[in-house]
Image (cartoon, rainbow, N blue to C red):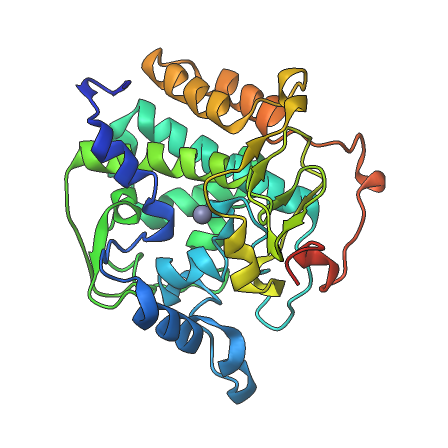
């Protein structure tokens, strides 16, 4: 295993960290039926009809809801719900792609330099607003309408808040305490990179080649095509989505000749880069060209998908 900064990483720690994006509030037991009922009750959009703000409308509603349904779905290489609270228009392809790459850059920089974890939360995301290389992820972490009462601005909260903290309520981000140490946070950042990369090979997250079914269920398989579309989880049938999120039944033979790496190779290369402390721009070029490859040569050739089409053919 590579070392992050100076400390070697334990294999179990790394495996645990690679699931951080699914459970960013570190609730641990927050799975199963209880989780399913609560997430559907609390995180989904039904409250809008009473003009309540949804948990997934902004980071105020917590990392958990926003990672799964809201403004932080780039954690999973999916289209985020647009920040405009009153529209659920499909996020354009390049907006999603730039957010994913921005999120990967953000995490890789933390993996290389633990000092960044000490930077102020609000200040960092305010400064990020005119840095295009981060793809606008700041909007996910700091709402456009934040004020001085925003919970991360009124206290000396640092970026380490994002990683490995535990919130009293997984559906809210107000009462959260950091747990773990700098090394834990850096491993979580590496886990977040690997998670987004691996999710990008799930047939239910992006369109690489064609999805397919066997025995009435969606296949989980690895294709090494460029990413034609990032799907919108909010538009998908969550059960059908999950069918493609299991261990892959196959890795397409085209991976041998494709310029896109397969998921195992991509993961190994990232770990290798971390071990070698490869400069961030080199790693970003790799991720942009060889993992998150776009088949579109210019903006005008990118299709605009309607809400139904944004789920992907197998996941409506
Ligand atoms: Zn995921």
Q: Residue furthest top?
A: 276
Say which residue appears at 56% left-offset and 33% top-offset: 250
Confirm whether residue 156 shows in the render.
no
**Image quarter (top left, top right, bottom left or bottom right) of the N terminus:** top left
Q: Residue furthest front?
A: 215
- Relative to 284, 212 lies left or right: right
Q: Is residue 235 above or below residue 188?
A: below
Q: Position of residue 214 (x, y in %)?
A: 63, 49
- Relative to 187, 252 lies left or right: right
Q: Position of residue 86 (x, y in %)?
A: 61, 73
Q: Position of residue 108 (x, y in %)?
A: 39, 28
- Relative to 7, 1 lies left or right: right
Confirm whether residue 175 shows in the render.
yes
Name the one closer to the observer, 247 or 261: 247
Name the one closer to the observer, 168 or 205: 205
Say which residue appears at 24% left-offset and 53% top-offset: 26
Q: Residue furthest right?
A: 300
Quarter of the view holding residue 258: top right
Q: Is residue 112 above or below residue 250?
A: above
Quarter of the view holding residue 12: top left
Quarter of the view holding residue 30: bottom left
Say which residue appears at 24% left-offset and 50% top-offset: 157
Say which residue appears at 72% left-offset and 64% top-offset: 308
**Image quarter (top left, top right, bottom left or bottom right) of the C terminus:** bottom right
């Amino acid at each position: 295993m590579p070392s992050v900064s100076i400390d070697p990483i334990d294999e179990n720690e790394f495996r645990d960290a690679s699931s951080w994006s699914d459970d960013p509030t570190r609730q641990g037991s927050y799975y199963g039926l209880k989780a399913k009922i609560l997430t559907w009750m609390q995180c989904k959009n039904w409250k809008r009809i009473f003009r309540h703000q949804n948990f997934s409308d902004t980071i105020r509603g917590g990392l958990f809801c926003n990672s799964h349904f809201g403004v932080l779905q780039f954690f999973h290489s999916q289209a985020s719900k647009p920040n405009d609270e009153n529209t659920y228009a499909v996020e354009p392809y390049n907006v999603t792609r730039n957010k994913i790459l921005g999120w990967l850059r953000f995490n890789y920089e933390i993996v290389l330099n633990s000092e960044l974890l000490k930077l102020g939360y609000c200040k960092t995301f305010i400064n990020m607003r005119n840095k295009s290389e981060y793809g606008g992820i700041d909007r996910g972490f700091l709402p456009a309408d934040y004020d001085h009462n925003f919970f991360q601005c009124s206290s000396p909260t640092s970026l380490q808040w994002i990683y490995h903290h535990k919130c009293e309520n997984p559906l809210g981000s107000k009462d959260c305490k950091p747990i773990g140490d700098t090394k834990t946070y850096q491993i979580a950042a590496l886990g977040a990179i690997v998670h987004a990369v691996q999710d990008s090979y799930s047939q239910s997250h992006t369109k690489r080649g064609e999805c397919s079914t066997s025995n009435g269920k969606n296949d989980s398989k690895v294709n090494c095509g460029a990413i034609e579309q990032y799907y919108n989880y909010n538009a998908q049938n969550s059960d059908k989505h999950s069918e493609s999120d299991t261990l892959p039944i196959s890795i397409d033979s085209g991976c041998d000749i494709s310029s896109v790496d397969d998921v195992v190779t991509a993961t190994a290369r990232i770990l290798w880069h971390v071990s070698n402390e490869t400069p961030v721009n080199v790693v970003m070029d790799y991720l942009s060209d060889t993992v998150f490859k776009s088949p579109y040569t210019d903006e005008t050739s990118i299709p605009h998908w309607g809400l139904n089409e944004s789920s992907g053919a197998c996941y409506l």
